[in-house]
Amino acid sequence: MVAGPGGRVITDGAVLHDGGVITAAGPRGEVEAQAGPEDPRLDFPDGTLLPGLIDSHVHLALDAGPDPVAVLRAAPDAELYAGMAGRARQLLATGVTTARDLGDRGGLAVRLRDDIAAGRVPGPRLLSAGTPLTVPGGHCWFLGGEVEGADAIREAVRRNAARGVDLIKVMATGGGITKGGPPIWQAQFTPQELSLIVEEARSAGLPVAAHAHGTEGIAAAVAAGVDTIEHCTWMGREGFEVREDLVDAIAARGIAVCPAASPDWRGFAERFGRERAEEMFGRLRWTVERGVHLLPGTDAGVPHAVFDGFVSSLEFFEHIGLTPAEIVDLATTGAARALGIDGDTGRLAAGLRADLLVVDGDPLADLAALRAVRLVVSGGRIATGPGGS
């Protein structure tokens, strides 16, 4: 049993849970002493028990096909919702018990989140950003979050908050899947506008995630005080534009960076150019060395980023030099801490949600073991394994 960060394990461990909450976790003998004779038991003598995994960047409204935007725009809400629910089930089956959805249409991810929480639909716990803010004709304009001017910005944040979102998402720069939109490196909001978004979100008690490929947008996001930066690829008009002072500011301010490494990151390297890709990958390794905290996320939904490939995305972090034990921490305790949910998930401890994963083998030695899923429990509900789907 992976009992805590840093590779701390219990050789013969157990977890007892009731009502969706862990009531005891530790050596089997101690946990058994707290269990009643009538409590059902599941045993995996050759497996490893660890906290459920956290995918910090998904787009359930997109289908990961060659043109997910066209599919989304053609789908009525009922059809889109059904597809989102199916993709949520895919995430759960791979051991993802928490996922952060960073952009939907019309509040569908909030609805799905609530249906999952109520047990009406199987899926991981969702943190939903609702409709992301963008400029007119900007990145992901088709989701309905176009804003222009301070009043429209305030209204959009308040509208998302009224729908019950868990965070605010802003498209600080252009993006790759928006045909005819701003270049991926180009900033979409002024520093003052991003500061207004953060200020309005804070007044609603909500964190802010900023999509930012370009260095200008990254700088504005850091100055505004966002909580996470998505992608953070340091792109400029003429190429990469890394600013060491900004890297240090990101680390000093505790802003987490989610590179959103696709499960197809190896294919991306081939398409992007292996030399340029390795330059980008090496830069990410360097930011870790300077103290930047990384978040694991798949960007699932965009082309090539499938919903059952989280382990492949985690192997990207191994490619840039992290050990399997460090990566397991990244996908459990580290992600929970960065997303502000470590008070109820990310570890196996009494009082936390019963988000559990059992796999064959030892993922602290070989990440491939995470593919051998034996049991998934999300909020106390068995999703995959004995008694599950």
Image: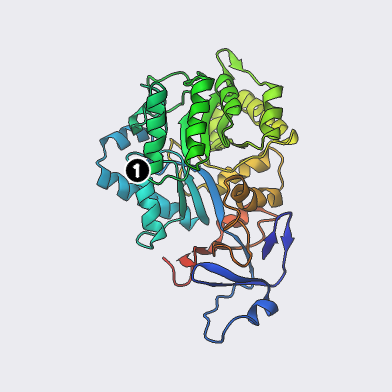
In the rendered image, the residue lying farthest to the top is: 238
Left or right of 373 on screen, residue 303: left
x then y, percent, for residue 389: 41, 65
Residue depicted at 33% across the width and 30% down the height: 142
Q: Which quarter shows the N terminus?
A: bottom right
The image shows residue 375, relative to residue 231, as above or below, that is: below
Is residue 178 visible in this depiction of the protein?
A: no
Q: Residue 188: percent from the left, percent from the top?
A: 47, 21
* Amino acid type at image mark 1: Gly
Q: Residues within 10 Å of mark 1 (few under 14, many from 20)?
A: some
Disc 1: which residue: 107
Q: Position of residue 187 (x, y in %)?
A: 50, 19
Residue 74 drawn at (x, y percent): 26, 35
Give me the residue at 64% from left, 65% from top. 349
Q: Residue at x 60, y 28 (%)?
A: 222
Q: Relative to the observer, which residue lies in front, 129 or 369?
A: 129
Is 184 left or right of 72, judged from the image as shown? right
Total numbered badges shown on the rendered structure: 1
Q: Image height check: is 364 above or below 33?
A: above
* Residue occupying image coordinates x 75% and y 35%: 289
Colour scheme shown: rainbow
Residue lying farthest front?
A: 203
Q: Is residue 304 left or right of residue 222?
A: left
Can residue 34 be seen at all in this image of the molecule? yes
Task: Residue lying at the far bottom in this picture: please name it.
Answer: 37
